[in-house]
Amino acid sequence: MQYATELETTIHDMVQKGRGILAADESAPTIAKRFRAIDVESTEEKRRAWRSLLVTTVGLGEYISGIILFEETLAQKTGDGKTIPEAAWTEKIVPGIKVDKGKIPLALSPGDLVTQGLDGLAERLRGYRQQGARFAKWREVYAIDQHVPTPHGIEANAEMLARYAAVCQAEGLVPIVEPEVLMDGDHDIDRHAEVTEAVQHAVFHALHRHHVALELMILKPNMVLPGKSCRRAEPDEVAAATLRILKRTVPAAVPSINFLSGGQGPEEATANLNAINQQGRDAPWRLSISYGRALQQTALQAWLGRKDNVPAAQQALLKRARLNHLAMLAKYRAEMEAE
Ligand code: 5MM
């Protein structure tokens, strides 16, 4: 593989004990929704200010090894004139880029979704690399109801993820492969487990077909949880179900599994990660995070779009990052939230 050495270096810089990934790659509609919750209009300047705040948090690099950015952010600058990717790297946080173009219905397969963005991907990746991105991320989304995802939907999505990952490795960017089985619905944890197992199985089969080097990618899966309208599960139950499914489906060659938070509350996501690391001491992969909302939510609420709130927001971010760092080491306790 042409870029094997670069890919190995990126994996080395990103996959480290006690460090995880911050997902700050919200597309325009999603960041507008997050800002609306704090009464802030989503202008380019506000998005620049928010993402600058994240990457200029002093000490963040102790807990965070990678940040997923949105296309617009790659060219934006922090107050001292560094680009956002450069500012991230001053904390040894590897900058990466979300490269999918969002989900659409899968034609003739009612209820199934599929993600678009493969056309011209190699050219786009070359441009992102020049702007400082060293890894990429692509998300496929699977809703659950009685009829979906269908076996055909699962296969079609796996094919997309594998084709994306192969193009990334050919162009020298580490692929984060993100198949997200949604928590929305009233399904129980067993149904979520059943779908997650089928999805992961198909994804790894497709990655193999497309010659993707598993050592040079990162998996970003959902945890196995009951649907949002179902009863809540305790962290030990979530950890047992999640590890059971991942051990059945994810080869040991994958260096790291970085969970998405998927709508869990910040404390819930940290407690579940802690239980996963407690029960997963013998697991072959690192068990870490690639959280968006569960890392950013408390910081956004402290910021409220105001310059004078930047230090408080950075403290809030640092606190969540540190608590998740402890959860990666299986040393988190709920009492620490109040400290
Ligand atoms: C599932 O979403 C990813 C992880 O975020 P959470 O921890 O909040 O679940 C996240 O990287 C997501 O892919 C981005 O925010 C982009 O989402 P959109 O919907 O804007 O493409």
Image (cartoon, rainbow, N blue to C red):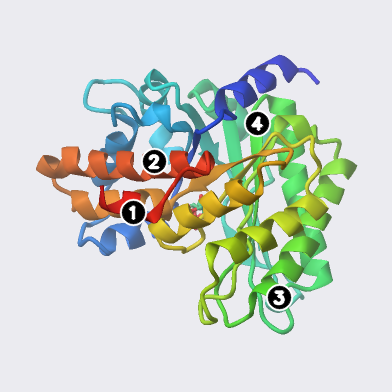
Nearest to N terminus: mark 4 or mark 3: 4
**Amino acid under disc 2:** Ala
The residue pinned by badge 3 equals 191
Three-letter code for the amino acid on which mark 1 is drawn: Glu
Instruction: Give me the C-alpha separation between circle 4 and circle 3.
Output: 31 Å
Give the alpha-carbon distance from disc 1 to disc 3, as whole Å: 32 Å
Q: Are marks 3 and 2 in contact (CB under 8 Å)?
A: no
User: On the picture, is 294 further left or further right than 98?
Assistant: left
Does residue 37 appear anywhere in the picture? yes
Q: Is mark 4 within 8 Å of ligand 1?
A: no
The quarter holding residue 323 reads: top left
**Type of amino acid at the residue the image marks with label 3:** Arg
Label 4 or label 2, whichever comes before in sequence order:
4
Residue drawn at the location 68% of the way across and 77% of the way down:
111
List the residue tagged with mark 4: 174
Q: CA distance from mark 4 to mark 1?
A: 37 Å
Kindly identify the residue that appears in the image at 54 percent across and 29 percent down.
Answer: 128
Coordinates of residue 232 in the picture (x, y in percent): 51, 75
Horizontal side of residue 211 vs 45, given as left or right: right
Q: Residues within 10 Å of mark 4 (few under 14, many from 20)?
A: many
